[in-house]
């Protein structure tokens, strides 16, 4: 496992495997998937029946990774964002297929495209909400700081008036 494979999809799996994402899968599965060709129907059957599921996952990455990752990287995402989102999408896709909710009204590529797009847009919305929340927090913190300054100024003014009131009438003039 010292040298990553040349094929970038297999290399991606290799990295995932090293990160324990697919630790249970032998590296040979990914090498076999580079030679594997599955139709949408064969892919769905493989996922539904759990037969050759490792090959099916590898095939999905091999066939669709570049296209789907470009959807993310071309919409203000990084390579790391693409890897994270696609891993989430593929896990969700497998769940959808295995639960029988995939109606096969579209191709696998179209369905994955839609899932990737929606997942990425949700992530962007989440990041936007987080950014807005952080700005509001900062603004509130700055307002709190200015309020405390105002309080301190009032306290100083009050102390000054207290001292002034202790002066005699001659000193007040």
Image (tube, rainbow, N blue to C red):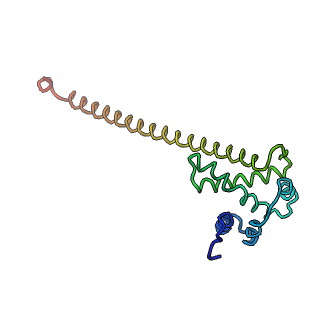
What's the residue at 86%, 63% (across, down)?
51
Quadrant of the rendered image containing residue 163 = top left
Residue at 60% over, 44% down: 124
How far across and how far down the image is residue 112, in percent?
A: 73, 49
Q: Give the tally of numbered discs.
A: 0
The residue drawn where x is 86% and y is 53% is 41
**Vertical relation: 23 (above or below) 116:** below
Choose between 46 and 109: the one closer to the eye. Answer: 109
Left or right, residue 34 beside residue 158: right
Q: Is residue 55 positioned above or below 66 on the image?
A: below
Residue 121, horizontal then vertical, whole percent: 64, 43
Which corner quadrant of the image does residue 56 belong to? bottom right
Q: Is residue 169 left or right of residue 86?
A: left
Front residue of 137 and 1: 1
In the rendered view of the protein, which quadrant contains the N terminus? bottom right
On the picture, is 112 further left or further right than 76? right
Residue at the spot 15% in from the left edge and 25% down from the top edge: 172
């Amino acid at each position: 496992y010292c040298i990553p494979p040349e094929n970038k999809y297999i290399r991606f799996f290799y990295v995932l495997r090293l990160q324990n994402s697919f630790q249970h899968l032998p590296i040979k599965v990914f090498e076999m998937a580079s030679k594997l060709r599955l139709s949408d129907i064969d892919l769905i059957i493989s996922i539904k029946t759990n037969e050759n599921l490792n090959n099916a996952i590898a095939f999905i990455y091999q066939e669709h990774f570049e296209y789907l990752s470009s959807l993310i990287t071309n919409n203000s995402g990084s390579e790391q964002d693409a890897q994270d989102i696609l891993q989430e999408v593929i896990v969700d896709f497998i769940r959808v297929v295995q639960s029988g909710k995939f109606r096969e009204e579209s191709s696998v590529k179209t369905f994955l495209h839609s899932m990737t797009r929606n997942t990425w847009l949700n992530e962007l919305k989440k990041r936007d909400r987080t950014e807005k929340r952080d700005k509001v927090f900062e603004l509130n913190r700055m307002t709190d700081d200015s309020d405390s300054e105002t309080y301190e100024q009032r306290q100083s003014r009050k102390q000054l008036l207290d001292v002034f009131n202790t002066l005699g009438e001659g000193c007040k003039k």
